[in-house]
Amino acid sequence: LNWVESKLILSSKLSVEGPVRMREEYFEGLLERPTVIEEAVPEQLRGALGQAISTVQQLPVPLRDVMSSGITVPLSGTFQRVFMISYLDEEILIIRDVYGVPEVLTRWDAGPSAVVEPGIE
């Protein structure tokens, strides 16, 4: 459905296991509540959407709070992946998983941050 957006945020820890080998361990997942883009909802479904919203608003406050803040799932390192660095420069990182499938990552500057990690410049 192109009128419902869902977001899953994974928190992970990277560790270096050798000159070209790294491990990524996922320790937490956050499933945010789906967002409905009301303008994109077909006209014939808008009544049902209104009823669903009304039903959710009638839920007890603790349940509404859970639904609005999302569901956190502790993963505690249950899921992990090992990958090899194929190429690395200032802008691009190319990695390959254990099956040789490549993944290209590019630098993303989020702009100035108010949080500064100790020892990182």
Image (tube, rainbow, N blue to C red):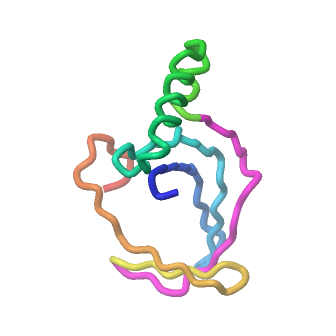
Residue 102 forms part of the magenta stretch: no
Question: Does 7 sit left or right of 112 as displayed?
Answer: right
Quarter that holds the C terminus: bottom left
What residue appears at the point 59 percent right and 17 percent down from the top-left corner?
59
**Residue that extends furthest to the top in the rendered view of this protein:** 60
User: Taking 100 as reference, is 44 above or below it?
Assistant: above
| Image spot of residue 42 (x, y percent) | 43, 50
Main SS, magenta residues: strand
**Residue that extends furthest to the front in the rendered view of this protein:** 44
| Image spot of residue 105 (x, y percent) | 45, 74
User: Taking 50 as reference, is 34 above or below it?
Assistant: below
Foreground residue among 85 and 42: 42
Residue 72 forms part of the magenta stretch: yes
Foreground residue among 79 and 82: 79
| Image spot of residue 113 (x, y percent) | 27, 46
What residue appears at the point 55 percent right and 50 percent down from the top-left corner?
8
- The residue segment tinted magenta is 71-90
Foreground residue among 51 and 20: 51
What residue appears at the point 50 percent right and 82 percent down from the top-left corner?
94
| Residue 28: quadrant of the picture | top right
Foreground residue among 52 and 61: 52
User: Taking 63 as reference, is 36 above or below it?
Assistant: below
What residue appears at the point 67 percent right and 86 percent down from the top-left corner?
100
Question: Does 116 sit left or right of 65 as displayed?
Answer: left
| Image spot of residue 55 (x, y percent) | 56, 22
